[in-house]
Image (spheres, rainbow, N blue to C red):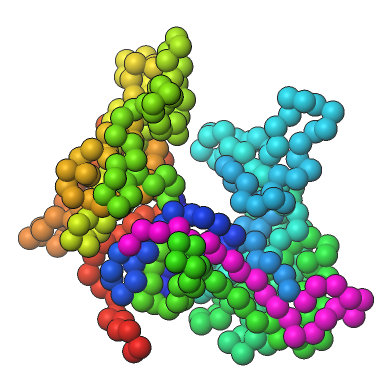
Amino acid sequence: MLVALLLGAACNPDKAGRRSLVLQYGIPYITEVSTSMAVTSDRAPAAGGPVRQVVDGVNRNPGGALACPRDGTDGVGDKDPDDPDDAEGRKYTDSEGRSMTAYQDPTEFVLFNDRYGMKTPEPDLNPAIGSDNSEGFEVVIEPDGSLTRPSTWSTVRGGKDVPKGKHVLQVVGTQPTAWLKEMYAAGAELTLEQKVTDTFDGRDIPLDESVDIVSGGHRLIMNGVNKFPGNRDAQGNPTSCARLVSQGEQIICKDSRTVVGVDDQGRTVLATLTGPRDENPVTGEADIAVYDGGFFADVTKPLTQLGVMDAINLDGGGSTTLLIRQKNDDPADTAANYRRYSGLTDLKHRPVFDTVYVGLGGELVTPGG
């Protein structure tokens, strides 16, 4: 899933019009948001050029995007102009044997905060693509905007810890590297812009720890109206096609679903829908008669019956799992503390890196406090 805002820090820039769940002072509502991130220098390059640079990402390996392009520069140059069958993006097989597509971008600005929890990425982190091979450059952005580099840092980017309460700006590519090196040598100060805008209301959402935002996909229910009451629209076309399976002339669009919504009492509702894998349980081969999950209508109908007024579909597929902690009198028996309510029936899930967590904890944040 795409997380737009976590603990007051934007997590994915340039995602215009994302349908999102906003939790502000603990009150949920669903809207559409756009995000933007950039750094602006107080000094112009000696040879001229921009003082403002768009930040391409947060807390990720620079040099390209996996699975789908994030912006207009991702994948540019990957397509072979002499091969009409060549798709943009580079195909490769990851360490777990999965077929992946990388959309290369050899010129990027990526920002890291101390919530990254890992050292900054080094060159050639992904051997399947060449766009992350650049030595690049990185600096610490101090709270006052000044740029520093500890004396222990090497000239090559990567392998550095992000100081608590500060940011590290890492760049790859010839022009970004030259720009950042010049700004650092000139003693420039950078202003970091992080903006999240509610496009429905036309207002900027405050970036503080009172707000968290989880971005999603299709708007399933809006103002109490079920947008997907059936599996097909008035023209007979399937209404949910995260996965296409052809059976004669029929197109089947079923998948595991992760849904978040707000009910008529203002409460946050989380729901998942899963089923068996899309393989025959006997032969292990793909079988269109065995589905994983369901249509959008399979989740919107029960949500409507529960009084859900607004709901969006989050990322689903094989990552869809619902775990609920159970009361357990034996604190040493940690495995029994969580009950698995949904997930693929063969219990073979791929690793999941994003979760929506609901529980007690954190600090009380009050308006104006």
Q: Vertical placement of 148 versus 49: above or below?
A: below
Q: Vertical placement of 63 versus 178: above or below?
A: above
Q: Is residue 116 visible?
A: no
Q: Is residue 49 visible?
A: yes
Q: What residue is drawn where x is 71% and y is 44%? A: 75
Horizontal arrangement in the rendering, residue 42 relative to residue 237 (left or right):
right
Q: Position of residue 3 (x, y in %)?
A: 45, 59
Q: In front: 48, or 1?
A: 48
**Picture quadrant of residue 78:** top right
Horizontal arrangement in the rendering, residue 70 relative to residue 50 (left or right):
left
Q: In front: 146, or 337?
A: 146
Q: Position of residue 43 (x, y in %)?
A: 79, 84
What span is in magenta? 29-51
Q: What residue is drawn where x is 51% and y is 81%? A: 164
Q: What residue is drawn where x is 51% and y is 38%? A: 96
Q: Position of residue 204 (x, y in %)?
A: 49, 73
Q: Quadrant of the C terminus?
A: bottom left
Queried whether the magenta region covers residue 35, the answer comes back as yes
From this viewpoint, which residue is outermost toward the front? Answer: 234
Q: Vertical placement of 324 versus 366: above or below?
A: above
**Picture quadrant of residue 184:** bottom right
Horizontal arrangement in the rendering, residue 250 relative to residue 81 (left or right):
left
Queried whether the magenta region covers residue 242, the answer comes back as no
